[in-house]
């Protein structure tokens, strides 16, 4: 079969155009293509349950200079984020969004996997439950919340142990492959003294969600919606279920607009308040960032310190803390400067040259009114009054 000269010329012209586009926009184009593949793979995370949101407008946007931030420093932070495969960098200060940068066709409303941010909601929802006394105290043993462990040695594990990822349960349970999350997590054996060693396992967040369901009498997705998501004004989001009508994954795989996480950052900055509304008792976020006995670098699903190394310096603000550990999404909070920073999608493949403090320290340094931060309280009784 012979092609006509005109058809051959058309094919060659199209191929040349494609090669030109790839040469000019290769990295961004491939990132967009890979994200499209990820969206096509989203049906793998089915079925899902809706977390109803309030669908309210986002915080007002103002120029960085109006919040005493140096635009050049913000641009430097964005350059670093973009060079490491990020999809978005969003900065808020004093309840205003002051900087946004997006890559690969991404935008504020782009729906993506929240990754480590998902488990953070379990800790925040626990703060609401404690504020409402559905859970009397973070040191509540699970034997009082889970009937299956009432006479079980694992019943001594406390809510605080789960929040600090130090339950003492065996590691290695593959929750993503489980068709019955509740049975799976309740069947994990105890191998260490609870509270003694921090091991970042998905089972702790999953047990925390189960404890919340038992304490509140609501499905986890429903409680996260009523306690947090709707009150933050975020758009509808979705949690992955183990089977239709089953348990929601609390450790990963929440699909939400990436920009809505700046609302959560603002909540953390304000110690549980959002736009003048106190969602949980003041002191809970301070309690979350209190260093754990099992690992002083971490609090409750947040990182509170970073030891200096050959590649990295400490946080530039003493009260800075972070969400996200294993590559992917990051959130940094600096209460003393009222700064909230969300960075989605830093490439795990580039972890070798990723500096964990580069972005937050550039943005902290951008604040013209930076002052030393006060040390957090040390007594738990001062953190959650009335308990």
Image (cartoon, rainbow, N blue to C red):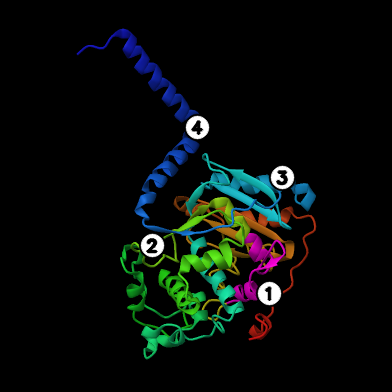
Q: Earlier in the sequence, mark 4 or mark 2?
A: 4
Q: Which residue is mark 1?
A: 282
Tell us which disc is closer to us: 2 or 1: 2
**Which residue is disc 2 drawn over?**
241
Q: Secondary structure at mark 4?
A: helix
Which is closer to the viewer, label 1 or label 4? 1
* Residue most extreme to the bottom: 151
Query: Against 375, is 45 above or below?
Result: above
**Mark 4 lies on residue:** 25
Residues in magenta?
Answer: 265-291
Residue 46: give x, y in percent of width and height.
36, 56
Q: CA distance from mark 1 to mark 4?
A: 48 Å
Query: Picture quarter containing residue 176?
Result: bottom left
Residue 368 appears in the rendering: yes
Going from N to C along the chain, the mark reached first, 3 or 2, is 3
Q: Crowdedness of circle 2 by 10 Å Cα count: few (<14), some, many (20+)?
A: many
The quadrant in which the C terminus is found is bottom right
Instruction: Classify mark 1: helix, strand or loop.
Output: loop
């Amino acid at each position: 079969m012979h092609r006509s000269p005109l058809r051959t010329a058309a094919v060659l012209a199209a191929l040349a155009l494609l090669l030109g586009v790839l040469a000019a926009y290769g990295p961004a184009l491939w990132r967009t293509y890979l994200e499209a593949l990820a969206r096509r793979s989203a049906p793998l995370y089915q079925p899902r349950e809706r977390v109803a949101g309030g669908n309210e407008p986002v915080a007002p946007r103002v120029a960085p200079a109006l919040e005493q931030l140096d635009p050049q420093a913000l641009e430097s932070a964005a350059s670093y984020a973009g060079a490491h495969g990020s999809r978005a960098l969003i900065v808020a200060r004093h309840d205003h969004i002051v900087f946004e940068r997006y890559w690969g066709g991404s935008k504020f409303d782009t729906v993506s996997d929240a990754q480590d941010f998902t488990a953070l909601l379990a800790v925040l929802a626990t703060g609401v439950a404690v504020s409402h006394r559905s859970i009397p105290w973070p040191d509540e043993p699970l034997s009082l919340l889970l009937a299956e462990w009432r006479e079980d040695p694992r019943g001594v594990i406390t809510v605080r142990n789960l929040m600090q990822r130090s339950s003492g349960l065996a590691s290695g349970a593959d929750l993503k492959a489980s068709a019955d999350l509740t049975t799976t997590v309740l069947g994990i054996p105890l191998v260490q003294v609870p509270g003694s060693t921090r091991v970042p396992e998905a089972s702790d967040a999953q047990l925390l969600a189960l404890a919340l369901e038992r304490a509140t009498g609501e499905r986890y997705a429903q409680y996260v919606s009523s306690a947090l998501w709707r009150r933050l004004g975020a758009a509808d989001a979705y949690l992955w279920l183990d089977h239709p009508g089953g348990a929601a994954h609390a450790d990963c795989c929440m699909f939400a607009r990436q920009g809505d996480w700046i609302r959560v950052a603002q909540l953390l900055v304000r110690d549980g308040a959002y736009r003048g509304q106190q969602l949980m008792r003041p002191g809970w976020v301070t309690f979350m960032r209190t260093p754990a006995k099992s690992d002083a670098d971490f609090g409750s699903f947040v990182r509170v310190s970073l030891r200096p190394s050959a590649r990295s310096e400490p946080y530039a603000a003493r009260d800075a803390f972070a969400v996200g550990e294993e590559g992917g999404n990051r959130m940094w909070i600096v209460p003393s400067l009222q700064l909230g920073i969300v960075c989605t999608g830093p490439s795990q493949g580039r972890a070798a040259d990723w500096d964990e403090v580069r972005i937050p320290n550039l943005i902290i340094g951008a604040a013209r009114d930076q002052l030393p931060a006060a040390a957090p309280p040390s007594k738990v009784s001062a953190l959650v009054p009335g308990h």
